[in-house]
Image (tube, rainbow, N blue to C red):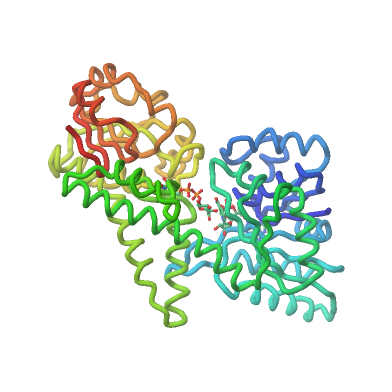
């Protein structure tokens, strides 16, 4: 099938590469010439495991192409995936300007039947808006052409995006047009060999399904984070509580890890957007408001612990920070807890030496040439002479460090662990003061 993917970010590039991998002919469009140049030169603008080789393979096979030419992109695909950003507007609502601009581009250029697929995360009613924008653009040209708009939200996780796209748990299709539904069935058939994973519904339900999934996951995390704070006060251990409740299949083990707050490009923005959608129709979403407030508080928990140990005035203090990305296996720092942590430490006069296996360049882009933030080439390099170690991301390479060396390198043998990586008794034996989230420390 000939497919155009509009927007070559995390979702667009992964979708384009995976669809090409299944034998489709895919053209990826982006308005950012720098991004397209990198891709045309054989590079990958983001860090995503497995993506580089897959892109390379499919470009070499002649099935995956990149362009900034809108005319060419609209002409190319019978299926036009819209995978552009939907960032939060000032009031928290999802800003649809990129989605609607992409729709306008399609309507003002198409000259045959198109299936337009919303893959971006968009509020309920957006498919109707996309339909209206395309119809208006066609009418302006005095042209009548058939087209369908489908909602096909994406559930992939950064860092595991290829695996998630190639082996999805479910594929949600929101559509009322039989022809479009059979196009989507054919497109996704290779991704669901063992069972039918397609869940077909109306576009509004599909749009809400995406927000409901992210909001549910964010709720689990905020709930566990709040329980962790309670556990600390009551002398209980959140890790044992997690195991205790996760064994109930109605609860399950996934997404129950307490930590220093959820970040990333989606949970924070999607929770806000859903609250905003509720407010627009007079439906309060009190649970979600609490989820958001709890997360904001949680991102400051490590700083509270640092202040408790070293005092409010942190001038002349330097902290080693392990992990900048909002989670492992990505260089993405959008809404990362590390950013709040660094800002709060700076506010109190401290400096930071950070180590992250892949996100240092992104941090340099975000923090510029701020002298208060230095970068180390290895986890141990970050420690030399630092007052304490703070952990914000659970990269695998942090899981079994040489605690003896950590103790020797730090000025004070203290670890503030925002991801609960270590057994408290082990650190006690190593002579390190350990401050995790919601755990009992001997
Ligand atoms: N990042 C993730 O893990 C996931 C993201 N989503 C959703 O997918 C959507 C895209 O997210 P990301 O890929 O992270 O965004 P991104 O910001 O990484 O990429 C969006 C790309 O679209 C391009 N663009 C904007 N307007 C355009 C236009 N009119 N024509 C062509 N290109 C255009 C931008 O230059 C940018 O490269 C969002 O709605 C997001 O909520 C959904 C599931 C997972
Ligand atoms: O809509 C999206 O963009 C995506 O958002 C999330 O994916 P992602 O943001 O890539 O990362 P997650 O693995 O969900 O982690 C999000 C945040 O929650 C935190 N988290 C996760 C799990 C947990 O138990 N505890 C916890 O604090 C992570 O550290 C991270 O900061 C969802 O998991 C995807 O299904 C969804 O498609």
Q: Quadrant of the C terminus?
A: top left
**Is residue 371 in view from this perspective?**
no
| Position of 337 relative to 44 (above/below) | below
Whether 403 is drawn above or below 278: the answer is above
- Can you give x and y, in whole percent of width and height, for residue 331 in the image? 50, 39
Could you tell me residue 308's position as x and y percent? 14, 42
Q: Residue at x 43, y 27 (%)?
A: 397
Which residue is at the front of the view, 7 or 277? 277
Task: Tell me the residue at 31%/50% (across/down).
Answer: 299
Write the residue at 75% across / 49% down.
Answer: 67
Residue 2: image quadrant is: bottom right
Residue lying furthest front in this view?
248
Left of 199 or right of it: where is 187?
right
Number of residue marks: 0
Query: Quadrant for ligand 1?
Result: bottom right
Q: Left or right: where does residue 241 sit relative to residue 187?
A: left
Q: Which residue is at a point 54% across and 41% down the rendered structure image?
A: 159
Q: Percent position (x, y) of residue 76? A: 83, 56
Res 152 seen here: yes
Outermost residue toward the right? Answer: 112
39 relative to 100, above or below: above
Front residue of 386 and 349: 386
Q: Nearer the viewer, residue 324 or 295?
A: 295
Give coordinates of residue 43: x percent, y percent. Answer: 66, 35
């Amino acid at each position: 099938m000939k497919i155009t993917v509009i927007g070559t970010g995390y979702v667009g590039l992964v979708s384009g590469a995976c669809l090409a991998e299944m034998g489709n002919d895919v053209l990826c469009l982006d308005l950012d010439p720098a991004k397209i140049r990198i891709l045309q030169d054989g590079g990958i603008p983001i860090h995503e495991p497995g993506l580089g080789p897959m892109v390379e393979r499919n470009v070499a096979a002649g099935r995956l192409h990149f362009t900034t030419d809108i005319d060419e992109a609209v002409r190319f695909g019978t299926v036009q995936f819209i995978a552009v950003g939907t960032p939060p507007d000032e009031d928290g609502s999802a800003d649809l300007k990129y989605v609607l601009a992409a729709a306008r581009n399609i309507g003002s250029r198409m000259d045959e039947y198109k299936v337009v697929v919303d893959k971006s995360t968009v509020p309920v009613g957006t498919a109707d808006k996309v339909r209206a924008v395309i119809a208006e653009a066609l009418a302006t040209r005095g042209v009548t052409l058939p087209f369908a708009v489908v909602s096909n939200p994406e559930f992939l996780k950064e860092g595991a995006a290829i695996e998630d796209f190639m082996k999805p748990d479910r594929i949600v299709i929101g559509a009322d047009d039989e022809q479009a539904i059979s196009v989507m069935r054919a497109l996704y058939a290779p991704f669901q060999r063992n069972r039918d994973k397609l869940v077909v519904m109306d576009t509004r339900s599909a749009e809400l399904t995406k927000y409901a999934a992210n909001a549910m996951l964010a709720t689990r995390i905020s709930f566990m984070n709040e329980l962790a704070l309670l556990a600390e006060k009551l002398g209980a251990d959140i890790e044992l509580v997690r195991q205790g409740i996760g064994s109930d299949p109605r609860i399950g083990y996934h997404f129950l890890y307490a930590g220093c707050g959820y970040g990333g490009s989606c949970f924070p923005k999607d929770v806000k957007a859903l609250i905003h959608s509720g407010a627009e129709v007079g439906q309060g979403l009190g649970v979600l408001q609490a989820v958001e407030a709890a997360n904001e508080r949680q991102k400051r928990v490590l700083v509270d612990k640092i202040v408790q140990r070293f005092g409010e005035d942190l001038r002349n203090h330097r902290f080693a920070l392990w992990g900048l990305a909002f989670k492992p296996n990505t260089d993405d720092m959008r809404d990362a807890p590390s950013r709040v942590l660094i800002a709060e430490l700076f506010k109190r006069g401290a400096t930071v030496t950070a180590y992250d296996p892949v996100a240092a360049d992104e941090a340099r882009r975000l923090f510029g040439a701020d002298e208060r933030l230095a970068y180390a080439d290895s986890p141990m390099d970050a420690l030399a002479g630092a007052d304490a170690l703070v952990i914000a991301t659970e990269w695998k390479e942090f899981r079994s460090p040489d605690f003896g060396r950590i103790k020797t390198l730090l000025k004070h043998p203290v670890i503030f662990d925002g991801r609960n990586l270590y057994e408290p008794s082990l650190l006690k034996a190593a002579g390190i003061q350990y401050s995790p989230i919601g755990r009992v420390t001997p």
